[in-house]
Image (tube, rainbow, N blue to C red):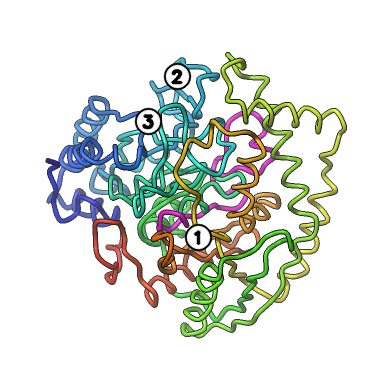
Amino acid sequence: MPRESGLSRGPAAAIAASVRDGSLTPTETVDTALDLIAAENRKTNAFTVVRYAKARAEALALEQRSDLDLLPLAGVPIAIKHNIAVEGESILAGSTATDTRPATADHPVVRRLRDAGAVVVGLTAVPELGLWGTTESEGRIGRNPWNSARSSGGSSGGSAAAVAAGLVPVAHGNDGLGSVRIPAACCGVFGIKPGRHTVPAEVGVDSWSGMVENGVLATTVGDAALMLSVLAARPDLAELEPPGRLRIGLAVAPPSRMFRVDRHWTAAARTAASAAAAAGHLVESVTLPYGESLVSVGLRWLACAAREAANLIRPERLQRRTRRHIALGRLVQRLRLVRPAQVDRVEAQLLDFFERYHVVITPTLAAPPPRARAWHTLGWLANVVISARYSPFTPLWNLVGWPAASIPMGMHPRSKTPVAAQLTAPPGSESILLRLAAQLESIHPWKRTVNEGVNDQPAIAG
């Protein structure tokens, strides 16, 4: 049985505070997390690598640091999505076609987390090359902690499941079409994708034409703000005083008439808007100018996969859906269908729209997470259709590189999984989103993890 204390499942800020004041040691916090993972990971398949010996050694070394009492994430066990570099570990990205040699150095975001006192206890599951909206691979299906018959989402589904199950209090994810916000919404945790140039992005392969950002999944807004402040090297992001009165738009219509929105997901956005109004903000219904964004995103999604394929060691091992995706991406490249002007037009319309609003609230998803099944064995079209149907609201903000977050707003009565609202804002608005989200959390709290009660107490300040 896992060793548990009152803080074993977080919040991260409380764990760090206890380590700094000496009431817990990094070895104790890491051992507890490793025990929880060993006992419970099989329920969700969240972790692909658990660093038992290495994490314990790193925790012991952390205890010797002379500045332990100053570290914002002192002794906090964290998970890293298995598609960025962690020294000594492979960067598999959910595929047997990738290079299996261990990384020789940490990615900058991993290095910042370690420098802040966090300990990497494991790497989390990702679909092949991070391309898909569900998380599974050969012999491993990502399952939702709330309902194991449903997917944890993708592509940061492993990280979201690990946090929602209480195996770690915070986790890294990255987001190219919604890959932090989608699984955050599926699993009932808070997830934020920062805007472009806020956090070091991917290394190599053009970061999906600038669409991918490294972000955070956490059980509280305070923990997410704390971790994002470390990733961005901006301590001010951890300060969550209420924002001034904001002008907020509520946009529940989907980006295209092709998509239907489940009424419970529409209700999630309306619940968030009502909470914002209760906090004193001016809220009104709006229609977002999505324009040609879905077409532009789709073309870039295809082309970026084709570029990544050039770096694969064993391309013949790719899944069938991925091979088709790459072939279509090469066609997009040959026809030169990706043009900067496509993004410029969409962003110009958004900038004009946001002259009137500070934040826009939408549903995060249009439907509950798909069934947990071996989606990787199905064809390309089946995977595209299922992802597009349930997550049409998230990609726009990757296209333009603006910050966006997903915040839990209740439970779906049929799927027995969470529902959530998406908060979006112009470049440079990460602090506004976090402060607004903290207000909404105080008005409409949620269960931090599947195993714990409603979070009606604020996280201990770091």
Quarter that holds the C terminus? bottom left
| Quarter of image, res 347 | bottom right
| Residue under the point 63% across and 19% down | 311
Mark 2 or mark 3, earlier in chain = 3
Label 3 neighbour load within 10 Å: few <14, some 14-19, many 20+: some
Q: Which residue is mark 1?
A: 406
Quarter that holds the N terminus? top left
Question: Cα distance, mark 2 to mark 3?
Answer: 19 Å
Residue 58, compared with residue 264, is above or below; it is: above
The reply, left or right, for residue 13 in relation to residue 229 is left
Residue 388, compared with residue 61, is above or below; it is: below
The reply, left or right, for residue 429 in relation to residue 26 is right
| Residue under the point 34% across and 45% down | 162
Q: Which residue is mark 3?
A: 48
Image spot of residue 282 (x, y percent): 59, 84
Q: Amino acid at mark 3?
A: Thr
| Quarter of image, res 389 | bottom right
In the foreground, 266 or 10: 266
Point out the stretch of residues depicted in magenta.
185-213
Mark 1 or mark 3, earlier in chain = 3
Q: Which residue is mark 2?
A: 104
Front position among marks 2 and 3? 3
Q: Amino acid at mark 2?
A: Thr
